[in-house]
Image: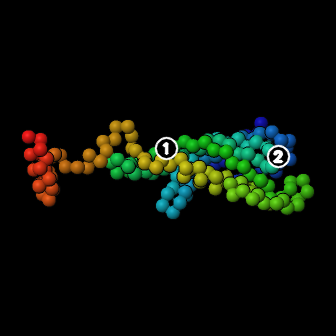
Amino acid sequence: MIATHLHNDTVVNVAQLLKARVGAVRTVTVHLDDLALDQDLEARNLEAGLKFTRIASGILVSGEVTVTSPQVCARCLTEFEGTYVESFEAEYWPSIDVFTGLPLPEPTDDEIFVIDENHQLDLREILRQVAILAQPIRPVCGPDCPGFQSLLPDSEDIADARLAVLQALLDDRAD
């Protein structure tokens, strides 16, 4: 099994793997210091352990991505660095036949990625998509997060004067 290590690079030449028999495997590890996910979102220290498997239609890339990104806690609104892990599988089809050099039909499925005419497989887009999916919808800074209550004044007696009438009704009802 061939192993490849990429540091701040996402392009792998897969010509030899495309020439191999179906079922051949190659492992790739990727480390990216920074990866732009969107205009306002960036990931840091992305680590990926990937397995490239030769399939009849191309290459199946599967693996696990660990990504660190700045977050804002949904409970207490403090900024923190969150680390998240996500697994994935993606299919890549060649655009050029590796044996004949003739162009191949493009996949009709939007979820299939294309290997370029130089047999270079670029992982950047799939890593970007997986890193975005790894982001939590409601990030929390930790299990001991005090929540939004930590932002409120200490006194429980502070009430809005406009609600005093309702408070008086509640007090009368309690008696």
The 10 Å Cα crowd at callout 1, few under 14, some 14 to 19, many 20 or more, is some
Vertical relation: 139 (above or below) 104: above
Q: Which residue is mark 1?
A: 83
51 relative to 144 in the view: left or right: right
In-front residue for pair 147/98:
147
Q: CA distance from mark 2 to mark 1?
A: 36 Å
Where in the figure is residue 119, as x and y percent of width and height? Answer: 79, 55
Q: Residue at x 90, y 53 (%)?
A: 99
Q: Secondary structure at mark 2?
A: loop
Where in the figure is residue 174, as x and y percent of width and height? Answer: 12, 41
Q: Residue at x 80, y 59 (%)?
A: 95
Q: Which residue is mark 2?
A: 56
Q: Residue furthest front?
A: 173
Q: Is residue 72 visible?
A: yes
Please tell me in which quadrant of the rendered image residue 89 appears.
Answer: top right
Q: On the rendered image, what quadrant is the N terminus found in? A: top right
